Amino acid sequence: MYRYFSIPLAALAFACTQVSMPEAPEGQRLFAENCAGCHGTGGMGDGPWAANMSPAPSDLTRLSMDGTFPRAHVLSVIDGYDRTGLPGHEMPEFGLLLEGDTVPVDVGDGVLTPTPRPLAALLAYLESIQR
């Protein structure tokens, strides 16, 4: 015998959109694995490989402009979509390494954009270390 359950469509849609958003500690782990070699453990551009790099890696603690963190730009640089204005374009593309389930991220325009969770986690970490 089969039993059918009736779930209102709105409740089903709500249940499907409940996603745990990544927080800074999750991004910090990814940063340590993928970024600290160049940018340093604190993100100031002083990693162990930085001494041999020209130009030096960016200080990622100073990305905010006028108190606003440039979320869309940061995401596009990390995944390799936009390298405009980066001297030498030495930073590797991490887009393929950071694929996975998506989470909704407001990139600064009030519109939620589906973003791979690892990329959103890195964004949360970088935003947390701004000075």
Image (cartoon, grey):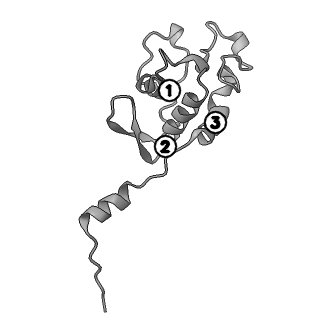
Q: Earlier in the sequence, mark 1 or mark 2?
A: 1
Mark 3, other Cα within 10 Å: few <14 / some 14–19 / many ≥20: many
> SS of the residue at dot 1?
helix
Residue at which label 1 appears = 78
Q: Quadrant of residue 17?
A: bottom left
Residue at which label 3 appears = 28
Q: Quadrant of the N terminus?
A: bottom left
Tell me what residue is drawn at x 33 percent, y 29 percent: 109
Mark 2, other Cα within 10 Å: few <14 / some 14–19 / many ≥20: many
> SS of the residue at dot 3?
helix
> SS of the residue at dot 2?
helix
Nearer-the-camera pick, 27 or 129: 129
Above or below 120: residue 108: above
Labels 3 and 2 touching (C-beta < 8 A): no
Tell me what residue is drawn at x 48 percent, y 35 percent: 96
Say which amino acid is labelled 2: Arg
Relative image position of residue 78 (x, y in whole percent): 50, 26
Above or below 94: residue 99: below
Gap between marks 3 and 2 measured at Cα:
13 Å
Residue at which label 2 appears = 117
Which residue is farthest bottom? Answer: 1
Q: Quadrant of the C terminus?
A: top right
Tell me what residue is drawn at x 53 percent, y 8 percent: 88
Nearer-the-camera pick, 84 or 3: 3
